[in-house]
Amino acid sequence: MAYALPTLATADAERPKVRVVSLNWAMSETLYAMNIEPVAAAEIAGYERMVGYPPTPPGVIDLGFQNNPNLELLSAIDPDLILIQSWQAAGRPVLERFAPVESFTLYDRGKGDPVEAARGAALRLASLCGNPAAGSEFLSRMDRSFADCAKRLAAKEQRPILLVQALSPTNLVVFTGGSLFDSAMRRIGLQNAWSKPPTLLWGSTQIGVDALAAYSQARIVWIASPDGASSDSLFSSDLWRQLPQVAKGDVHQLPLIWGFGALPTAERFARLLTAALTGSDG
């Protein structure tokens, strides 16, 4: 399935007026999408494998793990600002020895609207980096993309969706209300078939494959697993083959999409899902 990336700003990424370090992938992807280049970021290789969109600009320094950055290198960089998410709060006292720390909350244990929180984070980030106009332009671009997806989907018959990711041949994660994916689906006019509250952080629940059979009228959309093998094992299992949706061919696949990102991930998910459901190139 082909996928056309939405047009980003044409100019080369610019360093912000303040020297910013991002220790969080969600913050990094938001900066990159706004064409703002931090001095350094965490786990660049992992980001490229798990997120990958937008790509990390070539000049960004890798600071190591999100929760355990290279403090010696951080000191040498001498940043003006360090960005984290609220789940990294335990490391904040140490980080504040090097620069002021700004923390962002996108997920609240399955409550709230992650896309709306990500919108607010983008505006705040752009302001902190001295370029508030970049935030406004970015949100306008994202809104146009969501609106385009909604328009394309409105012309198709849509049914509620079970959005899952394989853990093993017999177990799945189903994304619930409070997840980034659920929030994005609602923005483009789609309904999540799984209405029960989440049991895991960031809007998801672990279930057995057989639980999907109770939702025979819902479409199944599965997101590729990070290791790939879990998806392969699932599709060769008898439990999967016996599902009514599988028997009817009412299953759609998406590539690996990081489920705990910010607005760029939500927009990418919306476009990929729209392409899968409409049979288009995205």
Image (cartoon, helix red, strand yellow):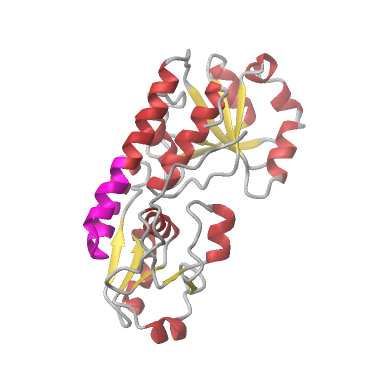
Q: Which residues are magenta?
A: 122-140
Residue 66 lies, in percent from the top left, at: 46, 67
Residue 139 lies, in percent from the top left, at: 29, 44
Residue 256 lies, in percent from the top left, at: 59, 44
Residue furthest out toward the front: 11
Which corner quadrant of the image does residue 197 belong to? top left
Instruction: Tell me how many marks there are.
Output: 0
Does the magenta segment cover residue 2? no
Examine the rendering and report whether any part of residue 111 can be seen.
Answer: no
Is 35 situated above or below 250?
below
Q: Is residue 60 left or right of residue 106?
A: right
Is 164 situated above or below 78?
above
Q: Which residue sits at x=63%, y=30%?
A: 209
Does the magenta segment cover residue 124? yes
Which of these two is toward me, 226 or 54?
54
Examine the rendering and report whether any part of residue 150 can be seen.
Answer: yes
Q: Which residue sits at x=50%, y=24%?
A: 161
Which of these two is toward me, 18 or 184?
18
Which corner quadrant of the image does residue 267 belong to? top left
- Image quadrant occupied by the N terminus: top right
**Please, what is the dominant secondary structure of the magenta stretch?**
helix
Which of these two is toward me, 38 or 93?
38
Residue 3 lies, in percent from the top left, at: 55, 37
Is 5 situated above or below 70?
above
Q: Is residue 278 left or right of residue 239?
A: left
Q: Which residue sits at x=54%, y=18%?
A: 215
Q: Which residue sits at x=44%, y=42%?
A: 6
